[in-house]
Image: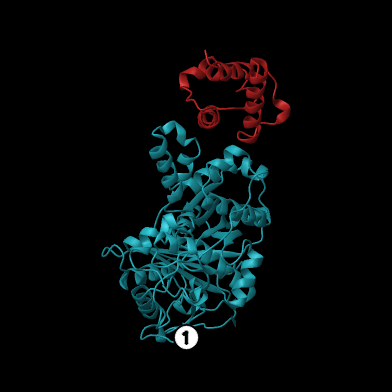
Amino acid sequence: MSRVVITGMGIYSVLGTNLGEVNKSLHEGKSGIIFDPVRKEMGFRSALTGMVNRPVLKGILDRRMRIGMAPQGEYAYMATVEALKGAGIDQPYLDRHEIGILYGNDSSAVPVVESVDILRAKKDTMMIGSGYIFQSMNSTVSMNLSVIFRLRGINFTIAGACASGSHAIGMGYLLIKQGLQEMIICGGAQEINPESTASFDALNAFSTREWDPSTASRPFDRDRDGLVPSGGAATVILESYDSALKRGATILGEVMGYGFSSNGEHISLPNVEGPRRAMQMALKDSGMDAGEIDYINAHATSTQVGDSNEAQAIDDVFGRTKPLVSSTKSMTGHEMWMGGASEVIYSVLMMQDSFIAPNINFDNPDEFSAKLNIVRTTTPAEINAFLSNSFGFGGTNSALVIRKIID
Amino acid sequence: MNLLMQNEEIINKINQLLIEEIEIDEDQIRNEADLKDDLGIDSLDFVDLFVIIENHFGFKMKAEEMTDIKTLQDFYEYIIRRVTPN
């Protein structure tokens, strides 16, 4: 079995469009949530959202590479360029090795809407053009990046709702651990637009604290009233320990364990048991004790039921050791398909800089969150190992345990 | 407007669209340039050319009509033929 390490990270998020900016925002406890008047005009119950600017790729990528990429693919490209650079991987290296890609993504709504709008208006499929098909498939990110970076290893997309990015890292870890791949570009991408979130808004799941966007996402707080959708992309370069040593790469962390489970119950309501099993499985896989986990990056999205159930599950597994807990979604909003990957990056940044980014807006605990050691303000802390939770619709759960490298 | 002038305008328009929309290098625009081998226009680009032609010249190309169009000169002549009244 190979040990699996992280040798590169890249991020394009509402907290910043590179690692340095994001690290600064995490230290400052800065919110990336805004009020989007377009959504209000369209009839959204909540116009709150995270927001990023589209990168300008003209002059960087040729036309064919650009026109098949939806905006979340562009975010993922930017994150992947940063991650590869950090890992010391250039195009000749990618050309000489069988590098894979496993990216989390679970929608691409705008190209579907726009191409059908054209068809309805023109009544001729030939007027749709050649780009929309490659933008509109769920695998849009992995298919585009694999072509741009000329990847020749494993190549597909993980669609696991709001745990997609975490499962992508987990599956990459398993493949490398088994010796089937030496290096995989893993990550998660999330589109930001009204088209993709309208039907989610319809579930009354979003916070309506529109008068003060930065306080709307308040995971674990007693007065939370829903999540805030967000997005961007996050890339993690996973590599076998031997390969990293051979290359002389800087090792940012070791993936010690991956746990997964399915609730087998309700389509949207989470439970306690499924997440608990995922965390226990990740711990067991890591060979570590609960007491060795210094920090938990919670999935907590700021919904009533989700946060309560996760708090109970964390308390069940970590009640005796009480690690520090925060949900960075308090700042980012819910990055959905991307969140599992971005939150690993946020947590590795904390591990590197020895601090815990705050769970902002945590003013009052409820019955369940009161049992956890939730960090309200930026706190200096030595993190040797952390666990990152991600859960999604359909009751899919993922937990990752990551540790500082020990030779 | 005489026919010659009109043809020149059409050719200039085609060149402009190839440069701006398909991002062909201006230096590569020559009458004898092979659309595929010299300009690198592939089957996917042709799909986009259909859209561009309808939007700018107001007629729909058919895929089978492209089989006889090899060079830029062929392409100019085809467009001119389609937009010039009999």
**Pointer 1: what residue?**
A363
Q: Amino acid at mark 1?
A: Asp
Chain ID of residue with mark 1: A
Which quadrant holds the N terminus of chain B? top right
The relative height of residue A96 versus residue A79 in the rendered view (above or below) is: above
Residue at 50% over, 35% down: A130
Q: Is A292 situated left or right of A308 in this image?
A: right
Q: Colour of chain A?
A: cyan
Residue A1 appearing in the image: no
Q: Is A140 situated left or right of A29 in this image?
A: left
- Mark 1 residue element: loop
Q: Nearer the viewer, residue A350 or B66?
A: B66
Q: Nearer the viewer, residue B78 or B85?
A: B85
x, y percent for residue A358: 54, 79
Q: Nearer the viewer, residue B71 or A42?
A: A42
The residue furthest top is B86
Residue at 43% over, 48% down: A138
x, y percent for residue A129: 49, 35
Colour red belongs to chain: B
Residue A69 appearing in the image: yes
Quarter location, residue A237: bottom right
Residue at 33% over, 75% down: A305
x, y percent for residue A180: 49, 48
